[in-house]
Amino acid sequence: MKKPFLCLSVSILLLLSTSAASQDLGADKKTLIRELLVIMDIKKNADAIRNALSVQIEKDVSAMLNRIIGQDTKLTKQEREELQQKVGENARKSRERFNRLFSERVNYPQLVEEVCYEVYDKYYTLDELRDLIAFYKTPVGQKTIRIMPDLFAESMAKTNERLQPRLEPLIKEIVEEETKAIQESLPKRTPAATTPKTQNKRQPK
């Protein structure tokens, strides 16, 4: 199976265009896609993957900020420790608040399902959909569905672990270049003219 996770990958990356409601799906194809989504337990897995993604982003951002703080020679040891602690606390609170608001305002499983109808209709024929359904009914297919969230989270974590040391110098370089460009674009201030102070000379008596 070359593309067993095509739908979820597209959904996680939010590559949305139009909803499935606007697609002219044939009855047979729509029935097959619906059966496939039920077998894959798409709604449950979509939420699990979103949560894993949220946790991983929090870890990655915190780790990157902590390394930047740790390399700042202008800070004292106590200042570094205090900043790193605040980074962790703020990242956790932000993630928790984001997840709460997201759950309240966005029906993510429903969104994923709508995207799946469109994407599977675009990339799979009727026979290929039948093959996918047959695969996910096998023991290997069921295991694939069961471990999908963990597989996604661990793959992303290991990728980021290898990628971050290469990204940080790039980010630092870009930030420094942009900062310098902004500073150079600002109008240069001319120093205010100073009038020489006149010294009071004593008159001879």
Image (spheres, helix red, strand yellow):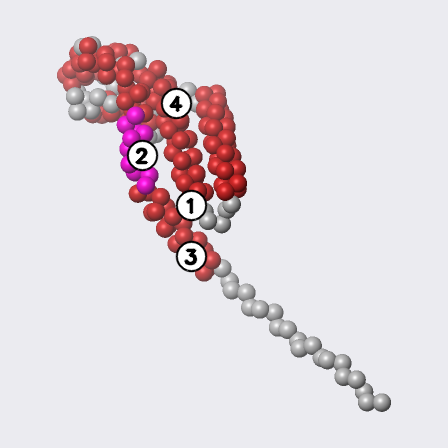
What segment is highlighted magenta in the picture?
154-165
Percent position of residue 192, x then y: 61, 69
- Residue named by callout 2: 161
Give the side of residue 5 with respect to residue 74, left or right: left
Q: Residue 22: which quarter of the image? A: top left
Q: Amino acid at mark 1?
A: Gln
Percent position of residue 174, x then y: 37, 50
Within the magenta stretch, is there residue 157?
yes
Decide which of tag 4 and tag 2 comes sooner along the chain: 4
- Residue named by callout 3: 181
Q: Amino acid at mark 4?
A: Asn
- Residue named by callout 1: 71
Density class for disc 2 (Cα within 10 Å; few <14, some 14-19, many ≥20) is: few
Decide which of tag 1 and tag 4 comes sooner along the chain: 4
Q: Nearer the viewer, residue 108 or 123?
A: 108
Mark 1 to mark 4 CA distance (whole Å) = 31 Å
Q: Is residue 32 visible?
A: no
